[in-house]
Image (cartoon, grey):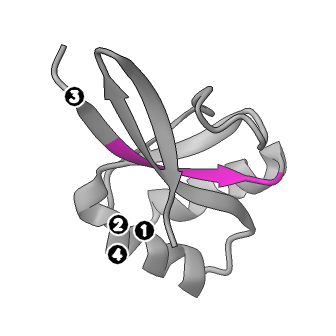
Amino acid sequence: MKDRQFGVITFKSTNYAIKGESVFKNENIEFRTIPTPREVTHSCGLAIKFDLKDIDLAKKIVEEKSLDIEGMFKVVKKNEGSFAEKLS
C-alpha cells in the first residue's frame, strides 16, 4: 500500500461538526465528512477530511467562520501503521 496523508479537522461535538460541514459546503475546498480516525480519538465521532494541499485554505475557513474545533491534524497511513500529528 502506498503511504497516504490527509488533513483532518475534529470538533468538540457532533453539532459543531455538522456546522463545520455546512460552512465547508459553501467554500471552494474539496472535503468529506468522515468518522473521526482512530488515530485522533479524543473528539466527537465526526471529522472533516481534506487534502493537505488545501491546509492554508482550511485554516482560513476555520478562522474566518469562527468554527469551534477540537484540533487540526495530519494523518499518515503507512503499511507499518498510522499516526496523527497535530497541526499548529
Residue holding disc 3: 3
Instruction: Please state which amino acid type lies under the numbered disc 3.
Output: Asp
Residue holding disc 1: 58
Nearer the observer: mark 2 or 3; the answer is 3
Query: Marks 2/1: CA distance?
Result: 5 Å
Check contact, mark 1 vs mark 4: CB within 8 A: yes
Q: Is residue 7 magenta?
A: yes
Where residue 73 sits in the image (x, y, percent)? Answer: 51, 53
Instruction: Specify few, some or many for label 2: CA neighbours under 10 Å numbering under 14, 14-19, or 20 or more.
Output: some
- SS class of the residue under badge 1? helix
- Residue 56's tag is 4
Check contact, mark 2 vs mark 3: CB within 8 A: no
Image vertical order of residue 16 relative to residue 62, above or below:
above
Q: Which residues are magenta?
A: 6-12
Image vertical order of residue 70 relative to residue 60, above or below:
above
Image vertical order of residue 22 relative to residue 44, above or below:
below
Check contact, mark 2 vs mark 1: CB within 8 A: yes
Q: Residue at x 81, y 54 (%)?
A: 12
Check contact, mark 2 vs mark 4: CB within 8 A: yes
Instruction: Please state which amino acid type lies under the numbered disc 1.
Output: Ala
Where residue 34 sits in the image (x, y, percent)? Answer: 54, 32
Residue holding disc 2: 55
Instruction: Please state which amino acid type lies under the numbered disc 4.
Output: Asp
Instruction: Specify few, some or many for label 4: CA neighbours under 10 Å numbering under 14, 14-19, or 20 or more.
Output: few
Query: Marks 2/3: CA distance?
Result: 19 Å
> Which is more toward the observer, 6 or 62?
6
